[in-house]
Image (spheres, grey):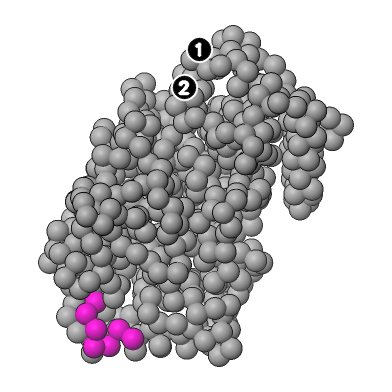
Amino acid sequence: MVKSTYGLEHHGLVNLGNEYWNLHAAPLTEMAIKRGEGFLAHNGALNVLTGKRTGRSPADKYVVDEPSVRDLIHWGKVNKPISQENFERLLHRVQGHFQGRDVFVFDGYVGAHEDHRLPIRIVNTYAWQNLFAHQLFLHPSKERLRFHKPEFVVLCAPDVHADPERDGTNSEAFIIISFERKIVLIGGTHYAGEIKKSVFSVMNYWLPLRKVLPMHCSANVGKDDDVAIFFGLSGTGKTSLSADPQRRLIGDDEHGWSDDGIFNFEGGCYAKCIRLSEKYEPQIYRAIRFGCVLENVVLDEETREPLYDDDSITENTRAAYPIRFIENAVLSGCAGHPKVILLLAADAFGVLPPIARLTPEQTMYHYLSGYTSKIAGTEVGMGQEPEATFDPCYGSPFLPLPHTVYAKLLGERMRQHNTRAYLVNTGWTGGPYGVGNRIRIDYTRIMVRAAIAGKLEENGMREDPFFGVQVPLHIPGIPDELLNPRETWADPLEYDRMARQLVDQFRKNFARFKDVPKEILEAGPRADC
């Protein structure tokens, strides 16, 4: 156990019980089990339940309204302001809650690039949540740990509940970022993803001010140093598609793009594992072992074998593990500039082609649109059916600055490095959700590999009449009819109707962007289709 000379009193945490600093996976797992926080699964992973909140709570996320950031933050439904007075009141309650309790401290950093890393500290009341932080974030050396001084601290107290009338919150849960105090407060929710995503939000504020693009994407690299990045929301396949046995994984969720190339923010992965199979996702399947944290996975009562197909608790079952558990991962977390960008959309309408080439202008249009379908369980309040949604930059819940800030940086990087881009439908074909079928992941892998290798265009392309994108006519290993989604529908006229409906939603959504160049505005789906 290595304790930093920069103590917890600097965060107002005094009169504590036992302090457990920077413990490794084995003792944290043992303590979590002894404290009744979880159970050991058959494969050695620690399985925990997060109570009624099994996903993120976007309605409970706030940014403190402070003078230094007031004119920079993109205020609205995502970045809701909370007063300094209400923040201080909740901060004092959290600090008081820690008194007399055992606390678990993780000191580390986010950002694999030495010039763009942020020293952080995570303080927990639960051993399993500290294990989550230990496996997800990056570790300093023992020598650096002794003198670690965080620039941001996360105080996570799930058992502290807010009073909406008194504290100005939406519910008992709160996730609050103070950029002036450099503190994240989390309470009223046990879902560990709030720890990860609050730190991501901090990086999304900090990095653009340094001319570095933060991205909600996974990334991998091939033997020819051909870096590919995968944009997409939860459930669209970022983690699954980037964990490719033929390529090396750089990271599964959050990256920065600097003048030197891309770098992973984290040292671990947070994979969805609903309906996980060794056949289709072997790397993720084998990564779930001792040291991994499973959230809300149903276990067999006798054998404690994970029942990955069981969604009785939530669709949003999760596995958190260090990236070194993935075979052939890039442990440095750093790589060159992307050759290919893949924009993932789980299309619940079933009308988007499974893969299509984009022009630079179309890339910017779809990046700002961020179309996909939210998958049940990833957020509190989601129903069982996917919902069509437009999420700018594929990560607007975590973007404190205006969306165009990130889009401008992406466009500059792509032009500078001549990066190709493709739109990939990981959703439905043959009909909408409930009628058609989800596109097989092994088919998507074949298409993605062809795009990265520059072979997608070898057998000719056609222009999609609704979306204006270039669609391959033939890809070895893929049924030709799958490449033309209209041919997979029993009623082609119903396909046309549904496609026009989605085109209309695209155009209505994009009307919100008033300050984008004309060539990007005109790069979207066609109004006269």
Q: Is residue 470 above or below residue 159?
A: above
Magenta residues span 97-103
Which residue sits furthest top? 459
Read off the residue under disc 2.
446
Q: Is residue 85 visible?
A: yes
Residue 462 point in image, percent of width and height: 70, 16
CB of mark 1 within 8 Å of CB of mark 2? yes
Query: Can you tell which mark lies on residue 476?
Result: 1
Q: Residue at x 42, y 30 (%)?
A: 227
Residue 222 falls in image quadrant: top left
Helix or strand or loop: what does disc 2 sit on? Answer: helix
Helix or strand or loop: what does disc 1 sit on? Answer: loop
Residue 395 point in image, percent of width and height: 55, 52
Residue 16 falls in image quadrant: bottom left
Q: Residue at x 57, y 33 (%)?
A: 437
Precedes in sequence: disc 1 or disc 2? 2
Q: Quadrant of the C terminus?
A: top right
Distance in Å between CA atoms under marks 1 and 2: 8 Å
Q: Residue at x 54, y 72 (%)?
A: 60
Residue 165 falls in image quadrant: bottom right
Front residue of 378 and 102 = 378
